[in-house]
Amino acid sequence: MLSRFLVPLFAVVGSYFLFAHPIRFGSTVWGKYAGLAQCIYFLALLAPIQLAIITRFIDLPLLIVTLVLLIVAPIAQFEEQ
């Protein structure tokens, strides 16, 4: 019963280590800007209530910029390879 689990597991792990090859993965400028925009957006969301006047005006534009950059960043990664 245990061999029904272990044999496929060893086969998968063995094929992974024998036939896998590394894929070049790095960040693009678009991805770095997307991460920065996401951090700033989370900072604006977590701002104290005393800053609600400021965050109310930057919330929606920052959300739009963050979403656009998060969509563009993977496309730029594919184009770079």
Image: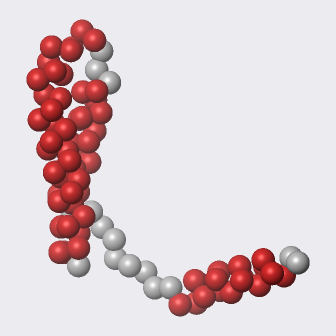
| 29 relative to 60, above or below | below
Left or right of 11 on screen, residue 15: left
- Report if residue 32 is visible in the image: no
Which of the two residues, 43 or 2, is positioned nearer the viewer here?
2
Kindly indicate the quadrant of the structure image that contains residue 2. bottom right
Q: Which color scheme did the rendering employ for the protein? A: secondary structure
- Report if residue 75 is visible in the image: yes
Tell me where residue 52 appears, x and y as whole percent. Answer: 21, 15
Left or right of 62 on screen, residue 8: right
Kindly indicate the quadrant of the structure image that contains residue 26. bottom left
Exactly how many numbered labels are in the figure? 0
Tell me where residue 27 appears, x and y as whole percent. Answer: 27, 63
Give the residue furthest to the right: 1
Residue at coordinates 17% horizontally, 59% vertically from top-left? 72
Tell me where residue 9 appears, x and y as whole percent. Answer: 71, 79
| 19 relative to 77, above or below | below
Left or right of 55 on screen, residue 5: right
Q: Which part of the image, by quadrant, shows the N terminus?
A: bottom right
Left or right of 60 on screen, residue 43: right
| 7 relative to 54, above or below | below
Residue at coordinates 15% horizontally, 42% vertically from top-left? 64
Give the residue furthest to the top: 50
Residue at coordinates 26% horizontally, 48% vertically from top-left? 35
Residue at coordinates 11% horizontally, 23% vertically from top-left? 57
Give the residue furthest to the bottom: 19
Tell me where residue 46 appears, x and y as whole percent. Answer: 32, 24
Which of the two residues, 10 or 2, is positioned nearer the viewer here?
2
Q: Which part of the image, by quadrant, shows the C terminus?
A: bottom left
Which of the two residues, 7 or 14, is positioned nearer the viewer here?
7
Kindly indicate the quadrant of the structure image that contains residue 10. bottom right
